[in-house]
Structure formats: C-alpha cells, structure tokens
Image (spheres, grey):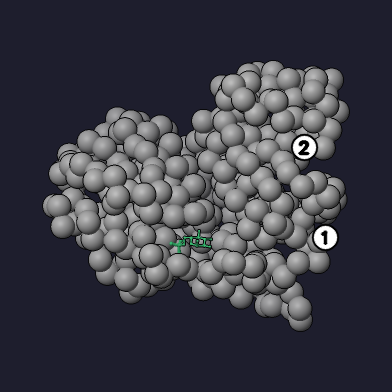
Amino acid sequence: YEHGLEDGESRMYAEMLEQPAAVERALRGRLDDRFGTAHLGGLNLDARELRAIRRVKMLGCGSAYYVGQMGAALVEELARIPADAEAASEFRYRDPVIEPDTLYVAVSQSGETIDTLLAVEEIRRKGGRVIGLVNVVGSAIARACDGGIYLHAGPEIAVASTKALTNMYVAFALLALQLGRVRDLSIADGKRLVNALQELPAKLEQVLKLEDEIAEIAADLAQCDSMFFVGRVRGYPVAREGAQKLKEISYRHAEAYQTSELKHGPLALISPEVPTVAIVPDDELTERNVAALHEIAARGGPLVVVTHDGVDLGALDVRRIDVPRLERELDPILLTIPLQLLAFHAAESLGLDIDKPRNLAKSVTVE
Ligand code: G6P
C-alpha cells in the first residue's frame, strides 16, 4: 500500500484511500492529448476491426457487473454503439446468441471468478471475440481472452472491492474513447474527456475528503434495518453498487431501484423508518430526480442525496453530499466514492469486521 497500512486499519480503508494513485497507474501511457483519444495496445484490435464492432456486451459478477453497466453507458454515449451489461452467472444458461460483430468484455478484479470464466469460454467456443478488463495479470480470465486492458489497481485484498472497481470504470472510459474516436466522436469531445480523465485523481482526492461528514450520515443509516438506493440512467448502476456495498459489509438490507420506477411499487414501503439514498447529479434528469425526492419526503422518508454543488433540491430536509463536478459522462465514478465511504462507516459504526464479511469470498472459483 502506497500510504502504508497502519495498525488495525482495514484493508478496505487503505484501498479506498489509494484510489487516486491507482487511477494514475491505470491512465499512465494510455492517453493521447493531441488526438483526444486513448491507446490500448492490449486489445489486439486495429482501427478497421474496432470500426466493425456493432454491439458491445459487458459480462461480470457482483460489483464488476454493476461497473459493466456503467461501462455500457459510456460506450453508448461516446461511441454510439449499442451496449449493455449482463450478469456473467446468468449469461451462459440462457443460451445466448453469439454474434461475430459483437465485442464481448469480461470484467473481473481477480480474473478467477468461475461464472465469468465459463462465460468467456462459451463465447469463444461459438466464435465470439472477448476482451478482458482484469486486474490480476496472468489470471485465468486474462489468459482465456483474445486481448484486454489490465487495470493496474495493484493487489486488492478486502472482499469489498473499491480501487479495482474505480479502475474498471477508467478502463471503460479509455475503451469508449478509443472506440468513439474511430467513429463519430469529435476531436474536441475526445480532448475534453482526455482532460477530464487527467483531472480524475485530484477529484477523487476531493471526494475522499468528505469522509467526516459521510461518517456521520453512515452511523445514522446503520441504525435502520432497510433502505433504498435510487438513481436514474447513469446514476442507476451507482445506486446498485452503493446498495451492494452496504449489504455486503454492514448486513443492512438495501435495495437499489430506478428512481423513475419508485412510483410503480416501492413507494408503498417508504416511511420514516426506511431512508433513501438518492443519486441526483446535475444533468438532463435533475428536475425529474428532484420531483421524486419530493414524493419520498411527502411520505416521511428520510433522504440522503448525493449530488453536485449548486443543485437546487427545493425546500427539502435532506442530508446532502456534494461531489465535485467533472464531465457529465464521467459523473458515475465520482458519485460512487461517497457510497464506498458510507458503507465502510456504517459497518464501522456497528463494530463489524469490514475486511472479512460473513458468507462472502473475495473471489468465487466454484460454480
Ligand atoms: C465476489 C465478490 C464481489 C465481486 C465478485 C466478482 O462475489 O464478493 O465483491 O464483485 O466476486 O469478482 P471479480 O474478481 O470477478 O471481480
């Protein structure tokens, strides 16, 4: 660990703090200022092959699946290629159609998750092309793929993944940029994103500084048995990852939902005992998101809002966490960090063993 593990300090904590440095490693030598693009040599795909891709499908398990969903949004926005994410554990069993012009992307920190590995093998057996977004060099998934992007997050020990997920996100941003720049993404937009990625480590430092205020909110949330995490479009996978982290290490029930779907069911459960953590970035959907906050508040539901400075939430009694702005496309990663801190401090306030959550393994190598 670059900053050194202090006595009794949790691995997850050290790994969270290491994220700015980890992102710098993931970016090193891969950004091109001049042409506003990325260079990912390990893909083993030339420009002609990149241009021939008609669809992109991300496959991973657990948090890697949720980051895959964030990655799919990046690819669609920047490269305008249809993209989606699926749980690798389900993919193989639904007898999927393997298309020759689809790029399959296997996402895994350990590179050893059996469900993801078997999905890769099934795709390759049927003639599909798979790249890996993998942290552990030379791991089974890395070896099974046609090419890939190593994450360079460094060893991750805590079961609850933090820096590897952040670097997965960065790898997706680089992939989306490279795919975009051999298609319609303009050089101006390419440069805008290259600059934003260069600023990301400093922005991550800023989010990590919000720790004390987040710890207070976390201690209160930890007193509740059940809560919602909600977000829309870019914010939805963020909500899913936030709920997952909280469940994994604090053993509180947390359910992620699309904010837009609340009124189609879960609003029935909102009450003063059931708080909602809402992801409300400053984007095309802010107004709609704020309207949903009012619906929750009207039913007495306590609110924690992860948002940007200056977003007007109206006269609502909420606890807000303002993250720094970057570029809209890259919002999800900065919105995710407070949720890591939230889960960590919720678990810590309950006196739980954060690095060894019950019933879970760092990587699941049997089906
Ligand atoms: C396990 C861990 C999760 C992790 C998932 C995928 O279920 O508990 O935290 O997200 O595996 O692991 P991978 O190594 O493939 O990223």
Quarter-of-image position of residue 279: top right
Residue at (76%, 81%) from the top-left corner?
Answer: 7
**Which quadrant: the N terminus?**
bottom right
Amino acid type, label 1: Ser
Residue 243 versus residue 6: which sits nearer the camera?
Answer: 243
Tell me where residue 115 sits by quadrant.
bottom left
Residue beneath the point at 15% across and 52% down = 126
Estimate how packed mark 1 is, as few (under 14), some (14 to 19) or many (20 or more) residues with alpha carbons within 10 Å: some
Which residue: 27% across, 58% down? 120
**Residue at the disc numbered 1:** 349
Does the CB distance between marks 1 and 2 fall below 8 Å? Answer: no
Can residue 178 be seen? no
Circle 2 residue: 274
Image location of residue 59, percent across then percent down: 36, 50
Comparing labels 1 and 2, the label whose residue is closer to the camera: 2
Residue 37 versus residue 107 in the image, above or below? above
